[in-house]
Image (spheres, rainbow, N blue to C red):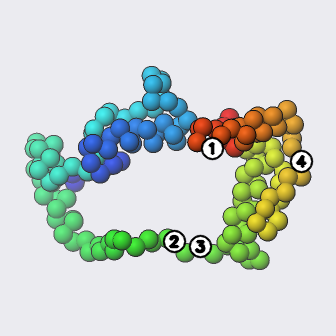
Amino acid sequence: MATNDVHYVEKGHSHSHDALICIGTQTLLSDTKRMRYVPEQFYLRSANEMKALFSEVPDAVRNTLEVAEKCNLEIEFGRLHYPAFSPPEHFTREGYLRRLLAEGLRKRYGLHARAEGQEFVVERIEDPRRLPTYVAQASQPAGSGASLLPIP
């Protein structure tokens, strides 16, 4: 089988993928020690490119084509396909999400909050010294790049 590790569709999407990795790993493009992939190598290659890559083992390309021809997959484009999710008993989907968010605030930031309808009520803060960080960041002008919660 001839396979190709695909992270983005077009070769030119390499830089965008690199930026997305930086966002996910909370690093900067300028950081020389950050996670990175070889540029312009993880795109969806054409059939001719795959044949060239596997020129020493042409059976691999033929076997891949044989398997692909046995598959019957139809993908409907232009329509969103979300998975069906059923929350635990006694929860609405939105209510369960709010509960998970409150648990995440406690685990990650030490903010003990409970979901009440559409709002969160903060009951306790484990480390009040961190509160000025929250307030300072929340008071930054919109679009300044500040986040509401510090990223540890």
Circle 2 or circle 1, nearest the eye: 1
Circle 1 or circle 3, nearest the eye: 1
Q: Residues within 10 Å of mark 2 (few under 14, many from 20)?
A: few
Q: How many angstroms separate mark 2 from mark 3 (CA)?
A: 6 Å
The three-letter amino acid code for the residue at tag 1 is: Ala
The three-letter amino acid code for the residue at tag 2 is: Pro
Circle 2 or circle 4, nearest the eye: 4
The three-letter amino acid code for the residue at tag 4 is: Arg
Report the residue marked by disc 2.
Answer: 83
Q: Which comes before the other along the chain, label 2 or label 4?
A: 2
The three-letter amino acid code for the residue at tag 3 is: Phe
Report the residue marked by disc 4.
Answer: 124
Q: Position of residue 49 (x, y in %)?
A: 14, 47
Residue at the (32%, 33%) spot, across then down: 38
Q: Mark 2 touching mark 4, by CB under 8 A? A: no
Q: Mark 2 touching mark 3, by CB under 8 A? A: yes
Q: Residues within 10 Å of mark 3 (few under 14, many from 20)?
A: few
Report the residue marked by disc 1.
Answer: 142
Q: Position of residue 81 (x, y in %)?
A: 45, 72
Mark 4 residue element: strand
Report the residue marked by disc 3.
Answer: 85
Q: Mark 4 touching mark 3, by CB under 8 A? A: no
Mark 2 residue element: loop
Q: Which comes before the other along the chain, label 1 or label 3?
A: 3
Residue at the (53%, 37%) spot, across then down: 25
**Which residue, as the protein is rendered here, is positioned at the far right?**
123
Q: How many angstroms separate mark 1 from mark 3 (CA)?
A: 34 Å
Q: Position of residue 3 (x, y in %)?
A: 25, 51
